[in-house]
Image (cartoon, helix red, strand yellow):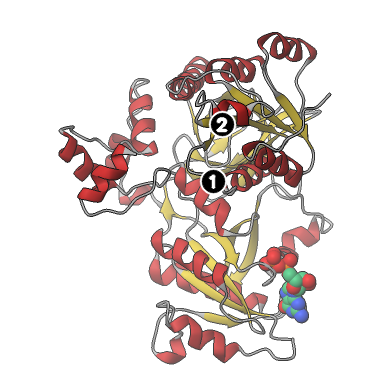
Amino acid sequence: ASLVTVLFHLGEMATATQSLDEDTFRTLGAELGYDVQIVSPEDEERELLAGFDIDLDAELEAEDDDDLAPRPPVVTVMGHVDHGKTKLLDAIRSTDVVADEAGGITQAIGAYQVRTVHEGEDRAITFIDTPGHEAFTAMRARGAQVTDIAILVVAADDGVMPQTIEALNHAQAAGVPIVVAVNKIDKEGANPDKVMQQLTEYNLVAEQYGGDTMFVQISALKRQGIDDLLEAVLLTADAALDLRANPDKDARGVAIEAHLDKGRGPVATVLVQSGTLRVGDAIVAGNGFGRVRAMLDEHGKPVEEATPSRPVLVLGLTAVPGAGDTFLVAPDDRTARQIAERRESAARAASLAKRRKRISLEDLNEALAAGKVETLNLILKGDGSGSVEALEDALLGIEVSDDVELRIIHRGVGAITQNDVNLATVDNAVIIGFNVRPAERVAELAEREGIDMRYYSVIYQAIDDVEQALRGLLKPEF
Ligand code: GDP
C-alpha cells in the first residue's frame, strides 16, 4: 500500500496488483533513492548464455547481409469470439496442396505452414494454430515475439466488437502489421463497408480510403476469398517487413506448444527463428534439454531439418517447455544440460524469494481473518501448456477483495512432482492438478507435509472452488 501512496504523490494512480511501465518504475526508484534496472527476459537470457560463451549480440553483428535468406511470414489469427478464427484456420489449412498429397490429414501441432503461389513464385506462410491474442500476449510477456503479421477477423454481420479492439491494440502495441479479414460475407445482413468504416477509427484505413491496410472479404465457412487473403498477407509482408534470417547456423527459436505424450515423453512444437534445426542436435527448450531424436511436420511426416519460420514437433526433450520459452541448439550435450539446469535454478530462486506459511483452501478464510496470510499461493500443473494457460488466465480473472492476493507461483505441464510439493511446502501453496496426478511417492510426501492438493478435469470447477475458498464458503472435503 505504501508504494501506491508514493505513486499517488508522483501523480500516478495505481492499485496494489497493477503492473507498472518502465518509466514509472524508474521514477519510483529515483523517488525512493534506488537505482532501478529493468531486466527484461531477453536480458536475463543473454546474461545466462554469456556464461556459456554464447554471445547473441556478437553473433548478430558478425552476420553479413549475404548470410540472410528470405523466410516465410509467421501469422496469428485474432478477433472477437465467434467471428470465425477457428473456421478460418481450418479453411486455410485445407488450401494446402501438400496436405492434399499427404491424404489431407493435418496433425494439430500448434502451428502449420501452407504453400501458395504468389506472383508466379512458390511461397510459404506459417500460421500459429492457437487463435486469439491471449497466446500472442502470453508469449510476448516471456519476451518471445513470434508473430510477423496479424490477421484480424471481423464478422461482417456483427462488426467491430470489444475483443476486435483488444486484439488490434495488442498487435499495434507489438508493432505487428494487420491484415483485416472481413468474414461471413455469405450471411444475410453482412455489411463489409461498415466494418471498414468502423476500423478507420483505429488507424486501420483501407486502401480504398487512402490508407495502407489491406481488407479482404471472405467466407471461412464457404472457403471463399482464402487465396486473396493469403495474397494480402504476402503483399503486406513484402511491403512492410524485411523477413530474412540466417539459415546457416545453430537453430534458435521459440516453443509454441508442448505436452507430455504417454508414449513419446515430452513433445514440443518449436518455431525456428534463425539457423537450421537438425535431427541429432543438442537442444535446450525452457528447462528441458536433450538430443533431437526426431522431428515431425504438420502432416506427421518425419523431417531431417527445419529452416527459419518452420514449425516442427520435436521429440527427445527431458522436460516439457512452456509456451513462449526460447529454445536453442547448444554446442554439446553437456552445455545443453547445464543451460537447462541454470534456467531451472533461476526459476526456482525466483519462487523461493517469496516464502510463506502452509495453507489449505478450507482454512484459507480463517487464516485470512486471523491475519495469518494475505496471499493464496497456487501451483498449477496440467496435461498441456494450453490448458495450464487457460486455467491460469481464468484464475487470475477471479475478483478478489482488497485484503487478499491470489498468486500463481509456479505452473507447468506434466504430473505433479516432488519439486512441486517442495515448492508448495516452502511457499505455503495449494497445488492444483488439471488432468494430472502425482506419483504415489509424491502423494505420500504431500500428505506428510500437509499440502493441499486438488485435482480437476473441468476448469470452471477449479475456479469455483478457489472462488468459494476466497469467500470462506468452501465446505471441507471428507
Ligand atoms: P472463433 O470463436 O472466432 O474461433 O469462431 P469459429 O470459427 O468457432 O466460428 C463461430 C461460428 O461462426 C461457427 O458456428 C462457424 O460455423 C460460424 N462461421 C465462421 N465463419 C463463417 C462464415 O464465413 N460464414 C458463416 N455463415 N458462418 C461462419
Q: Nearer the viewer, mark 2 or mark 1?
A: 2
Residue under pointer 1: 307
- Mark 2 Cβ inside 8 Å of ligand 1: no
Q: Give the percent coordinates (x, y) of residue 181.
A: 59, 76
| Residue 339 vs residue 277, the one in the foreground | 339
Q: Quadrant of ligand 1?
A: bottom right
Q: Quadrant of the C terminus?
A: top right
The CA distance from mark 2 to mark 1 is 44 Å
Mark 2 surroundings: few (<14), some (14-19) or many (≥20) residues within 10 A? many
Residue sitting at x 49%, y 33%:
328
Mark 1 surroundings: few (<14), some (14-19) or many (≥20) residues within 10 A? many
Q: Give the percent coordinates (x, y) of residue 156.
A: 64, 83
Q: Amino acid at mark 2?
A: Leu
Q: Please give left or right for residue 393 compared with residue 445 in the image.
A: left
Q: Amino acid at mark 1?
A: Thr
Q: Give the percent coordinates (x, y) of residue 100.
A: 79, 62
Q: Please give left or right for residue 256 compared with residue 214 in the image.
A: right
Q: Is residue 92 visible?
A: no
Q: Please give left or right for residue 198 compared with residue 88 in the image.
A: left
Q: Give the percent coordinates (x, y) of residue 261.
A: 76, 32
Residue under pointer 2: 376
Above or below, 94 relative to 273: below
Above or below, 375 relative to 115: above
Residue sitting at x 77%, y 16%:
439
Q: What secondary structure is marked by label 1?
A: loop
